[in-house]
Each structure stands twice: as C-alpha cells, then as structure tokens.
Amino acid sequence: YYLQAANNGHVESMTCYAVLCHDGRGIKKDFKEALKWNKQAADLGNTRAMNNYADQLIKGDGCMKNKKAAIPYLETSASKGDPHGIYMLGLCYENGDGVEANMYTAAQKYSEAAEKGDEDAMLKAAEILIEGQYLAKNATKAYEYYMVLADKGNIYSCVKMGQHLEEAGQFSDAAAFYATAAEKEDPVGMYSYGKLLLEGKGVEKDVSKGVKLISKAADKEHPAALTKYGT
C-alpha cells in the first residue's frame, strides 16, 4: 500500500515506506531504498523524512557518512518547527556532527524542542537544567519534564522522580515511582524500592521483598546493592 501510494507521489507514504525499509518491518531491510524515499519525501517538504534522511547521512546508513550534508535538512526541519528536528540539530551541536561543537547552542536547541514536547529533548534539557552549566539552573522545570516522561512510562525519569521525592522526604510518592521502575527490572529502581521496603519508609515494611529486590539489583551489578548488602 505505502509503496503504491509513494509511487503515486503521496509524500507521507514515501516517508512511511522509508521507515519500513530502514527497520525491516514486514519487508527486507534495505537502507539504500530507505535513503532514496527519505530524500524524495524530504525534498518535497516532509520534516519527518528530513530528520530520517539526515540521520542516515550522519550514521552512513545506505550511504557514505556525510554529516555536513545532514545539517541543511535538520535546519529546514527545525525552521518548520519540527520538535525532533530541533532536538537532532541540538545533538549535532553537542557532538560536533557536521557543525562546530557548541554545547550552549545544543542546550538551547534541547530546551526549545523540550518545550515543543520532544521526549528525547526533555531528558537532555532536564539534565542540563539541573546542572545549570549551559542553561540557567532550574530544577523545577527539570522535574516537570521528568514528571511528564515518568507518566509516559520512561523508567529513567521514574527513578529521577523517586530520587527527587525521597530527598524531599516524600517517601510514599518516591516509593510509587521506584516501584514502577522496579517492575521493569531497572537495577536502580529495584535497589531503591527494596531499601524503602527494608526501612518501612513510605511503604509497609517488608524485609523479605526488600531483600529479594536488592538481591536482583545486585545480580545486575548495582554497586550499592553489592557493597551495602553483600548480595
């Protein structure tokens, strides 16, 4: 369906078919075919295709790496307000891919994309806002991003919210976030939730369950689980 529509000039179908080719979803993986359709859709103004084509150029998927050639596509995507295009441009400035590395510019791009709802950018911006090195320090805004992401099931953000709330003495809320991460077998989540269970902070004390979780965290080589509890 997508290929037929793409051949008939439907730009969104070109982009969707390129994704299928790139990822090998239902068809044989073919980076060169993905590159072809991404470029065609990108040149017709599709920002998702611009981002994907730029990503292929940067990584050399289906072509020789050409990081400089990726930048105009990301700049166009960003100028059209595409959140992920803005985020990807930020990554280029952070890593020096096709442009001179500039962490201040990268941080500005991450912040802009985060405000537009890009989840990858929210993670980047949150870390920078907490450090306060490349953007004005703003822990409140950082934890707003983590909260949004945690509510969407992002495990790293669940852990960050748990740590933030535990430091604030809000043990019950912290335990809820840690429990979510622990359910996904995140070692930090398992250790942190296990510790609260052992101590009975914010949850009913359950030594057996706490020890079991910390043991599982140790199995995943969580340092504190290994050293503090010797499991």
Image (tube, rainbow, N blue to C red):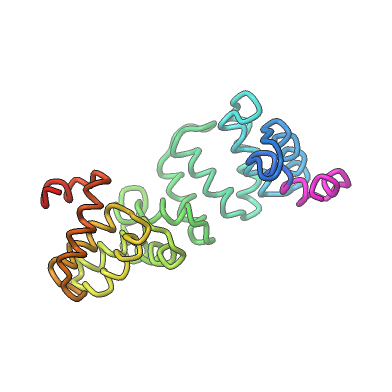
Q: Residue at x 65, y 26 (%)?
A: 63
Q: What residue span does the magenta drawing correspond to?
A: 1-16
- In the rendered image, which quarter is residue 153 located in? bottom left
Look at the magenta stretch and give its main secondary structure: helix
- In front: 21, or 211? 211
Q: Percent x, y for residue 159?
A: 31, 59
104 lies above or below 118: above
- In front: 200, or 165? 200
Is-magenta flag for residue 31? no
Q: Percent x, y for residue 224?
A: 16, 49
Q: Percent x, y for residue 96?
A: 47, 33
Q: Is residue 147 left or right of residue 210?
A: right
193 lies above or below 63: below
Q: Percent x, y for residue 1?
A: 82, 50
Q: Is residue 74 left or right of residue 8?
A: left
Q: Residue most toward the top?
A: 64
- In front: 117, or 34? 34
Q: Residue at x 44, y 56 (%)?
A: 122
Is-magenta flag for residue 14? yes
Q: Is residue 65 left or right of residue 229?
A: right
Q: Residue most toward the right?
A: 8
Q: Residue at x 57, y 54 (%)?
A: 83
13 lies above or below 68: below
Q: Residue at x 44, y 39 (%)?
A: 94
Question: How many numbered marks, from 0 up?
Answer: 0
